[in-house]
Image: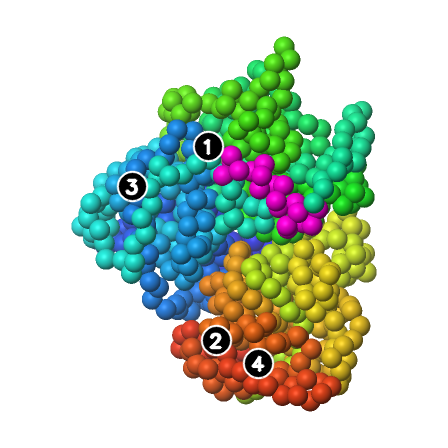
Amino acid sequence: RNLERYGFLKWGQKNLEKFHVVPPGTGIVHQVNLEHLSPVVHQEDSVAWPDSLVGTDSHTTMINALGVLGWGVGGIEAEAVMLGYPLFMPLPPVTGVRLTGVLGRQVTATDLVLTLTQLLRSQGVVGSFVEFFGPGLSSLSVPDRATIANMAPEYGATAGFFPIDDLTLEYLGMTGRGSRIPLVRAYAKAQQLWHEPFNEPDFSRVLEFDLGSVEPSLAGPKRPQDRRSLSSMSGHWTQALEEIYGRSDAGDGIEVSMKGERFMLTDGAVVIAAITSCTNTSNPPLLVAAGLLARNARRKGLMVPAWVKTSFAPGSRVVIDYLDEAGLLGDLEALGFANVGFGCTTCIGNSGPLPGPVASAVEKAGLVVAGVLSGNRNFEGRINPHVKANYLASPLLVVAYALAGNIGRNLDKEPLGLDREGREVYLHDIWPSDEEVRGVVDQVVRERYFTDRYADVFSGTPEWQAIEADNNPQYNWLPDSLYIRKPPFFDTSFSAFPASVSAARCLALLGDSVTTDHISPAGAIRPDQPAGRYLQDNGVDPSGFNSFGSRRGNHEVMVRGTFDNIRIRNLLVPGTEGGWTRFMLPGTADGPVMSIFDAAVQYRDEQVPLVVLAGKDYGMGSSRDWAAKGTRLLGVRAVIAESFERIHRSNLVGMGVLPLEFCAGDSVRSLGLTGSERFDIDLRKAFVPGGDVPVRTVHPETRKESTFSVISRIDTGAEVEYYRNGGILQTVLRSLLS
């Protein structure tokens, strides 16, 4: 089912100069870059310069752990860069985080990054570079730094940078790049890129952080910044059930029969436990510790309950090598954490379905069940459509909660289960010591595993090598393809916009923290969705739908999935979840409820432009270009929000959709907007970065008018040109043709 997409990549590798593919099955791109690809410092003849990187995934920031400045950009911007356009951005402020102290015993890098994410989100670092420095830095290994740098998008920063020091060089040696150490050391010191613990650079502002203040933590149930201490989880869950999910009484649950077992499934049941994502699987101490905890649990006779779906998906093949040498793979597998592949899997929503009896019970009883994953995002509807509450945690706590079976258990005070003699076993009984973890890591994480695994990194499996590709610089579009279709982004309908938007209607009225997952899901396609119906109409059985992520090359699928997350809440249809809206009939403030896609088609047929209204942090999360592409294809001309996340804002501009920000103190609520109005927007002042743009609203029935100003979030002169031309791709096309 992936042959067509892989063939497209193979065609690109064969026909495009300087385009190289690390084949599928090798690992996650960020981890491969960290462990092998990055030289830290480049050299050509007598010239040396620092490595740098932009990537089409927001977790590109992981490479910041090596002292390489890199960050995520939208796919639209990346396409322009690959076609020769520079990347423009305002010079960002740089927030310094002075690290002091050391992490406490049995506190992990995951606990640290979740705590930093909570802190930095509250301090407001969106659009900033964050640089970590200070005497505490020397206690953090490069893998620990990678865990922190990886989650820069979650704490809102453009980058989470660590300067080069001796630990950087040590990591280069461990991963088979020892020959680069003399150049990296000399260059970093000569260019003042070397970390001096007591030499403070000139930052825009400095935040203090004591590593010793960190405690074991999780984050959830639906945002990475919502950290919860392990000791508070039981009380938190009771409160969350009532305040977030409206279930004051969890009740006795529902009886389920599966694989010869009968059990009661209740609210809080952990139905997914996944060791996943580059955030944590790039960190040998975390994975070794999880393996040791699994070994200790296995020796005690503890078992994972039948309702827990477990999985283990490392970010590179090296992980399996050192866990195998340590003898820990069998212990993880015994608890259900068998290797399911090398990739993002559960973290991006590809956990696969829950077992049928469990999914049916969740639906029938309306249960609020939980997932625990060592990932970086837990946004609503991202992990699994049946799992409303998702918590980020270290690999050790993933295993622990899999054993506990319920997120509401107090793991500090309640036993995980009984051993073979019937004695209670607590988490502290099986938690490995820091000394034991270090001893195993020092023994099994070897340079040869990295050099062996990456010796032929571009070769791929026999299946990859067998894929044939045309020797033709022009791609041969297949008219019947349901994976890769010729996109419409160069059609005349994508030319420059008029000077104003008149009589626009609101397609969606949204709240705060709307993520790119809400806007453009990457996970499973449901048969009852517009995208699912489209595939079925074209002869695809639901078993062959694959995922939205795999269908990104087909705009017909992706536009139908836009704003169709199972958990999105459009306030035009209060009390509902999912991709629904109210189609406003001409001259009225009301109309029938229908899917967002169907409404957009009807508005398009009637030549009615569209707007989206939203609250704070609009577009947070993945650098998902389809969140902007789909918005544009639906006919949305402007998004008016209280604030935007960096990458999505630039993606909107890149697609010719105008991001407009409410003035300070203004919001949908304060202005009394209901979404039933007609909107007139004078776009002439939108071409001034940060300029005031007048908006006039007219009630379609009473004809009552009101006006307010919003701020143009076209931030640079280059973006002005993009918007005038209808987007980046149109701008690049005009440049190439001229």
Left or right of 639, for residue 130: left
Q: Which residue is mark 3?
A: 100
Q: Nearer the viewer, mark 2 or mark 1?
A: 2
Mark 1: few, some, or many residues within 10 Å (few <14, many ≥20)?
Answer: many
Identify the secondary structure beneath mark 1: helix
Query: Gap in Å between the C-alphas at discs 2 and 4?
Result: 29 Å
Number of numbered discs overlaid on the protein picture? 4
Magenta stretch, overall SS: helix
Residue at horizontal 56 percent and vertical 38 percent from the top? 233
Disc nearer the start of the sequence (1/3)? 3
Q: In the shown orientation, is residue 358 left or right of residue 502?
A: right
Give the residue number, with chain letter if any, for mark 2: 663
Q: Secondary structure at mark 2?
A: loop
Look at mark 4 in the image and give the residue it sits on. 495
Q: Nearer the viewer, residue 357 or 179?
A: 357
The answer for how far apart the CA atoms under marks 1 and 3 are is: 22 Å
Residue 158 seen:
no
Who is closer to the viewer here, 349 or 386?
A: 386
Which residue occupies the foreground of this view, 204 or 483?
Answer: 204
Q: CA distance from mark 4 to mark 1?
A: 51 Å
